[in-house]
Amino acid sequence: MVTLKYEGMIRLTKEVLSLLKNSKGRVVNLTSLDGYRPLPSIAAYTSSKHAAEAFTSCLRWEMKWFGVSVHSVNPGTFKTVLAEGAEERIKLLWRKVPGSCKREYGERFSKKILTFTRMFTSNASTQTSLVADAVVHATCSEYPCRRYFPGYDAKFLWKPLRDLVPEFIMDSIIDTFLKFALPRPAATM
């Protein structure tokens, strides 16, 4: 996953960088809200998106001298093929987990992850055109934003919480939320 989501972005950018410098072009990377604000239980995905965000930010500063502008689009939760198949992928992954790990986390944990996933995907936005609109604006606008946050959860919940709430309070909010959303692993009780 990291190779596709992160290394692919770097390779493609490197391939066209000299063209972008010569034309004073524009880079628009599609990352994720999870690269801006991590949540537990999706560490591999979040890590790849954090790497993409860091790459985009560094590239923005480095390319400024060449007249190349760099932007990121950080969508919130949308009903996509990826979101629609999340529950089945989690079930498949759980079946492949070694017995020792299953005992450590417990069946209750697995079921709660499925409920948590169902809640997120059922409340996901169906307006995927918001993401396309952000990409078009970032690509074509005379004055594009550095970052775009399409989706109501991104724009009105997660981005303001991350930007305005101190990290220790945000950690408390997420801890409280997780107490209700996810059970503790069986081995920690």
Image (tube, grey):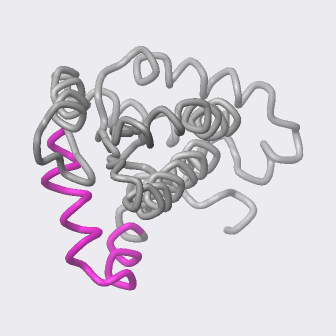
Residue 75 percent location from the top left of the image? 30, 39
- As for residue 173 lying within the magenta part, the answer is yes
Rendered view: 173 above or below 154: below
Q: Quadrant of the C terminus?
A: bottom right
5 relative to 146 in the view: left or right? right
Residue at 78% across, 53% down = 104
Q: Nearer the viewer, residue 38 or 31?
A: 31
Is the stretch drawn in magenta largely helix, strand or loop? helix
Residue 118 lies in quadrant: top left
**Residue at point 50%, 42% (across, down):** 112
Residue 33 in the image: x percent, y percent? Answer: 36, 48
Give the quadrant of the N terminus.
top right
Of the pair 141 and 84, the residue shown nearer to us = 141
Image point (23%, 46%), residue name: 148
Q: Quadrant of residue 64?
A: bottom left
| Residue 78 at x, y percent in the picture | 29, 28
Q: Residue at x 80, y 35 (%)?
A: 97
130 or 116, nearer to the observer:
130
- Residue 129, horizontal then vertical, whole percent: 17, 21
Q: Is residue 171 magenta?
A: yes
Q: Which residues are magenta?
A: 151-174
Viewed as shown, does residue 169 lie left or right of 46?
left
Q: Is residue 70 left or right of residue 100?
A: left
Q: Is residue 40 visible?
A: yes
Q: Is residue 3 above or below residue 51?
A: above
Look at the picture and state if 33 lies above or below 22: below
